[in-house]
Image (cartoon, rainbow, N blue to C red):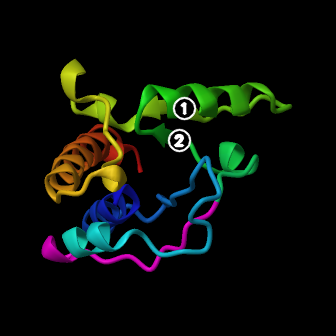
Amino acid sequence: MAEAVLQNLIDKRQLKTWQTDSAGLRDWNVGYEPQGRAQDLLRQHGLKTKHLSRMITDNDFYEFDYIFGMDNSNLKELQQMADELQPHPECHIELLGSYIGRKEDEIIEDPYFSREMGSFHAAYAQILESCQNFVLKYGNLD
């Protein structure tokens, strides 16, 4: 969901030098579209994605200025991956939710394992607020 949300904001602000992508730390869904409930929720908000899941690569740490994790486990694993690379990448590895500005909301729980749509709505709201704040903070630097 985060890639679609951020891409929409990039398009609206016409941030022509910005690019976004999504990649996972596990290969469970490589080559597949986002989970159906996520796509349904994106459509409810007028968004869509044609993204197919892929694994994060070493090159991503050099190609992107920011790499976001959704929770501390993601963050730790991403940082460990970056620390093993030479030359050391200059990208910022951060929690996407840190842009919300409220410590209690900075972890964006994976809604996949929930049976209810409420978890998807909560994750979407956190993602949207985080991405909006990120674009507000850095959008004028384009």
Query: Which residue is label 1 attached to?
Result: 92
Amino acid type at image mark 1? His
The crowd level at tag 2 (other Cα within 10 Å; few <14, some 14-19, many 20+) is many
Compared with 42, 111 (above or below) is above
Residue sticking out furthest to the right = 86
Asked if one can make out residue 102 in the rendered structure from this viewpoint, the answer is no
Query: Which residue is label 2 attached to?
Result: 67
- Nearest the eye: 90 or 3: 3
- Nearest the eye: 15 or 125: 125
Q: Quadrant of residue 43?
A: bottom left
- Nearest the eye: 28 or 38: 28
- Nearest the eye: 6 or 115: 115
Q: Quadrant of residue 1?
A: bottom left
Amino acid type at image mark 2? Ile
Q: Main secondary structure of the magenta part?
A: loop
Compared with 103, 23 (above or below) is below
Query: Is disc 2 placed on a helix, strand or loop?
Result: strand
Q: In the image, what residue occupies the spot 32% across and 28% down?
A: 98
The part of the chain drawn in magenta is: 43-54
Verify CB contact (< 8 Å) between mark 1 and mark 2: yes
Q: Quadrant of residue 102?
A: top left
Mark drawn on residue 62: none
